[in-house]
Amino acid sequence: MRAALVIAGKDLRERIRDRSALILAIVAPLGLATIFSLLLPSGDVAFRTELALVDLDDSSTSAAFLSGPLAAIEEAGIAGVVVLDDEAAAREAIEADDVEAAAIIPAGFAEAVRAGEPAEVTVIGDTSAGLATEILRSLAEGYVAELEAIRLSVATVSAALPAPPTEAEIEALVAGAIDTPSPITLVDADSELRRMAASTFFPASMAIFFLFFTAQFGILSLLAERRQGTLPRLVAAPIPPWAIVAGKAIGSFILGVVSMTVIVVASTLLLGAEWGNPIGVALLIVAAVLAAMGITALITTLARTEEQAGGWNAIVAVTLGILGGAFFDLSQAPEVLSRLSFLTPHAWFLQGLDELAAPSATLGDLALPIAVLLVIAVITGGIGLARARGLVAAR
Amino acid sequence: MTESTAAGAMLVCDDLRKRYGDRAAVDGVGFHIAPSETYGLLGPNGAGKTTTISMICGLLERDGGSVTVDGRAVDIGTAAAKNAIGYVPQELAIYPELTATENLRFFGQLYGMNGADLKRRIGEVLEIIGLDDRAGERTDQFSGGMKRRLNIGIGLLHQPKLLVLDEPTVGVDPQSRNAILSSVEELGRKGMAILYTTHYMEEAERLCDRVGIIDEGKIRAEGTRRELVGMIGERDRIELSATGNLAAAADAARAFDGVEEATVHEGGLGLIVVEAHRILPRLLEAVGEAGASVTSVEIVEPDLEAVFLHLTGRALRD
């Protein structure tokens, strides 16, 4: 074991000296994570828009739109609402980007509703602000639908009366209809969100992506030792051949764990990432490093030269990265791609971090991601290390 | 000086065999090296020297035969026997990103050395190989000769009982080459058993107490320089620098009475002859008539080159 540690120490010293490890293990993933965090839209930033209402009817019915749905959306912080005098003012405000959409309630609106005649609410919006316009249109549709329901209920009651109701009676019926609770109540379950924030996703995805470049260093250096002639000297030393392979593996493991840990700490401090339970994160990192080591060891030992191994590892790293959701949110991807992603360590690592994002997450929630990562490590690493053992055996 | 029997030998190789497909790279090689003896394996490239050394050092599995170092059998994974061997490969087996000291420390640790002993020994070796003033520099800053010396120093570090050097002067400038040969001579004088492979006849003659001439995987002859040269009796070696039809000239020379071997090499002919001074005028005439134009003649005292030519019919440089 001492010989393995000596070899691992030597390898790490070499990697630090040539700086390639530092660049691939820390600088590149942190740099890209920072760039992505700054450039790409983030789900953490709340949507907000500015809306306008033009109430030309100036009735209690039309005022209900402002005091009802519009007040609710304003209270929720999704939109700010201003009241304007006329349609021209609304169009001017949209043109000036002061608001993104406006609803116009025409004069005689309440009267038309009451008489059961056609009545309409007009929504106008900035063509570049489709979402804001859609939101306002939905609110208006809801408002109109509710008015229609009230009108129907009043009409139904009125038809049952022996004489047509007076204005005061109609007002009372309307008030009663409004106050009557709906027999069906939609309860927002407010399901617990198991999803890491974007400020965590980008460092995490870049960390697991670049891990496949750092994890290959150990076994890849066996091919380098063979090329530069130092491998025979290691084999000639009075140490068992497995110690050479173990030394290479230990070097890779340390490099992988250190790089991931640095990214976790740095992204927490610099980008505001929230990784979750440190013990859970540590377990996920160890499992992911082992899986990456296994896959890269297998690929490297299938190659004949360093260049070939480096090329194959890069292709596999990029393919698994894309497939595993390191570059985009797989929840937006087609179902097939989403399912295929679970063939990759990347997807399981990221899922593990998603689990940790839930406020009530426990280490038990990580059992499946960690188990899958370890199975990948054992299968691919077992084959890879057996083949690596062949590289250092006398022939 | 030398022991010529296997009893008490530092290295005993017996009937070593290694095949690559149909080709026998090593075919029944056997020799031994006494403690404090320098033994040379002399042969051209591809003769089987490196394959033999690789089997001795446990880098290569044998198809047959046995190797014993300091009384211990060398097999794959036999740490004790490997610990007795200091291996200096033909390729530069050093780490370019590490300093000379770091290279030595790393290999010293692999051989179980550590602490003050390792530090002291590193200092000693750096002095032996003349790199004590460059100890802290990365080896990718070193000249080729300095790298060669460090390559040897690593083999010496753990004070092996047997030092195995595989063509350590290949590709080295004359000055560094001389320094390396002096170092090996000094180690031999201090009593280290040394196995030295080379295809340079002069190096074998200068360094080795005994020489095994190897060709096509077999030891063709073995002995001290005097014993080997004695094998060709009163023969002389003639080096003719010539141009023209050298193949026809060699054929003409072979047909000449008194010429035992004639080989063509770059720039001329190499001949093994009996009584060179007596036949030389008529020999030059015959070579000229065959279409060669001779520009210079050198009669060389019998040496290992002549012995190799005599034994194999080919020059060492082939």
Image (tube, rainbow, N blue to C red):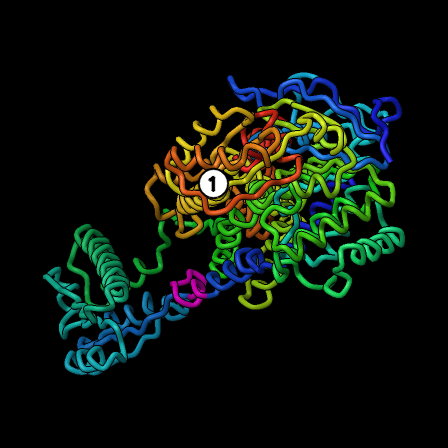
Quadrant of the rendered image containing residue A101: bottom left
Q: Quadrant of the N terminus of chain B?
A: top right
Q: Which residue is mark 1?
A: B268
Q: Residues within 10 Å of mark 1 (few under 14, many from 20)?
A: many
User: Disc 1: which chain?
Assistant: B
Nearer-the-camera pick, A387 or B149 = B149
Residue B219 at x, y = what percent? 66, 23
Nearer-the-camera pick, A169 or A227 = A227
Q: Is residue B179 left or right of residue B128?
A: left
Outermost left residue: A117
Residue B262 at x, y = what percent? 51, 30
Nearer-the-camera pick, A247 or B289 = B289
Looking at the picture, does residue B302 appear above or below residue B76?
A: below
Looking at the picture, does residue B53 appear above or below residue B147?
A: above
Magenta span contains residue A40: yes
Which residue lies at the image location 66% right of the left edge and 54% below the top edge?
Answer: B147
Residue B50 at x, y = what percent? 63, 33
Q: Is residue A16 left or right of residue A41?
A: right
Bounds of the magenta segment: A35-45
How many numbered marks does the figure carry?
Answer: 1
The amino acid on which the numbered mark 1 sits, given as a three-letter code, is Gly
Looking at the picture, does residue A175 appear above or below residue B268?
A: below
